Image (cartoon, rainbow, N blue to C red):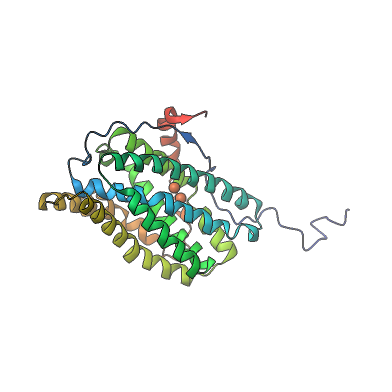
């Protein structure tokens, strides 16, 4: 028997214990969308509030996803599990692709009257300040929180085609492609956090701050900024439409509440909620937009 036999060598790495609990292969895909099908800047049922809210979200992605990649990569050298290491690389490639596509659609939004460029400068400045002030652990924790919210929103997009039907086709397909990849890599940042940091109390604190204050406040402030910059006066009818799309029956927030709360449960893991089947179905539908697959 060799000296490196696992029977004799107490320090040999175990082959059946993996930090990664991913259920799906993480596949970075190249896509091609033509964003020339926007007929109006208030493309979502003529409602400026809802339209601006989704533009604001798209505007946050290039800077936000850049920070997701950086904060996870800070721990790359500490990851022992080779499977998780490989997943970090694929997660980073997926997020980088998302940023490229959102930069393109954000440019189109600016061409039709929004000012996402100014918002992007603001987000980049804020994140640069965080890099200086926050610890690597806190930055990773915030990324884990944002990744959970993104995965929950992705689940909503894939299960509510009636809402997605209100978007121009190119924007809808961009969101759906982004959604399937967000679900594919939804556990990567979490698994890295658990292997390298493991401080659940701090993670829950960051989650409460992010979901109760930072995220809703940022989206509200950014949407308001976009509409103010273009000099649009919002009507009560538009406000009511936004309220219904968020809190009405099947609305984004009403629908997401249950999955939002899952994060704070004992023994939470992103794949405790298994939506792998859903991703498989949508991969087939979106296949015509994947380049070179
Ligand atoms: Fe993404
Ligand atoms: Fe992500």
Viewer-closest of 78 and 250: 78
* Residue 86 shown left or right of residue 120 in the figure: right
Viewer-closest of 289 and 18: 289
The image shows residue 32, relative to residue 278, as above or below, that is above
At a point 18% along the width and 45% down the height, the residue shown is 47
At a point 31% along the width and 50% down the height, the residue shown is 56
The image shows residue 205, relative to residue 259, as above or below, that is below
Viewer-closest of 53 and 246: 53
At a point 10% along the width and 53% down the height, the residue shown is 236
Residue 276: x %, y % from top left: 46, 43
Query: Residue 19 sits in which quadrant?
Result: bottom right
Residue 63: x %, y % from top left: 43, 53
Viewer-closest of 290 and 157: 290
Residue 284: x %, y % from top left: 44, 31
At a point 54% along the width and 62% down the height, the residue shown is 193
* Residue 73 shown left or right of residue 229 in the figure: right
Number of numbered discs: 0
Residue 170: x %, y % from top left: 33, 34
The image shows residue 153, relative to residue 164, as above or below, that is below
């Amino acid at each position: 028997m060799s000296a490196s036999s696992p029977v004799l060598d107490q320090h040999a790495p175990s082959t059946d214990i993996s930090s990664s609990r991913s259920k799906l292969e993480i596949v970075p895909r190249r896509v091609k969308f033509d964003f020339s099908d926007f007929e109006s800047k208030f493309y979502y049922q003529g409602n400026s509030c809802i339209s601006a809210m989704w533009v604001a979200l798209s505007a946050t992605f290039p800077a936000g996803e850049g920070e997701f990649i950086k904060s996870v990569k800070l721990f790359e050298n500490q990851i022992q599990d080779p499977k998780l290491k490989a997943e970090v690389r694929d997660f980073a490639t997926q997020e980088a692709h998302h940023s490229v596509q959102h930069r393109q659609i954000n440019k189109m939004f600016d061409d039709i009257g929004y000012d996402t460029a100014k918002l992007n400068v603001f987000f980049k400045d804020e994140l640069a300040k965080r890099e200086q002030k926050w610890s690597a652990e806190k930055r990773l924790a915030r990324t884990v929180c944002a990744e959970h919210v993104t995965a929950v929103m992705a689940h909503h997009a894939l299960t509510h085609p009636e809402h997605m039907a209100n978007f121009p086709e190119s924007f809808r397909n961009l969101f759906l492609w982004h959604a399937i990849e967000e679900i594919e890599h939804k556990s990567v940042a979490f698994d890295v956090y658990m292997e390298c940091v493991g401080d659940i109390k701090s993670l829950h604190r960051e989650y409460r701050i992010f979901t109760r204050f930072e995220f809703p406040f940022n989206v509200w402030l950014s949407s308001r900024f976009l509409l103010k910059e273009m000099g649009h006066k919002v009507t009560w009818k538009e406000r009511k439409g936004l309220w219904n799309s968020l809190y009405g029956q099947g609305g984004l927030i009403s629908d997401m509440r249950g999955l939002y709360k899952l994060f704070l449960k004992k023994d939470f893991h992103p794949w405790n909620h298994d939506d792998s089947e859903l991703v498989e179905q949508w991969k087939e539908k979106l296949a015509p937009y994947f380049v070179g697959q």
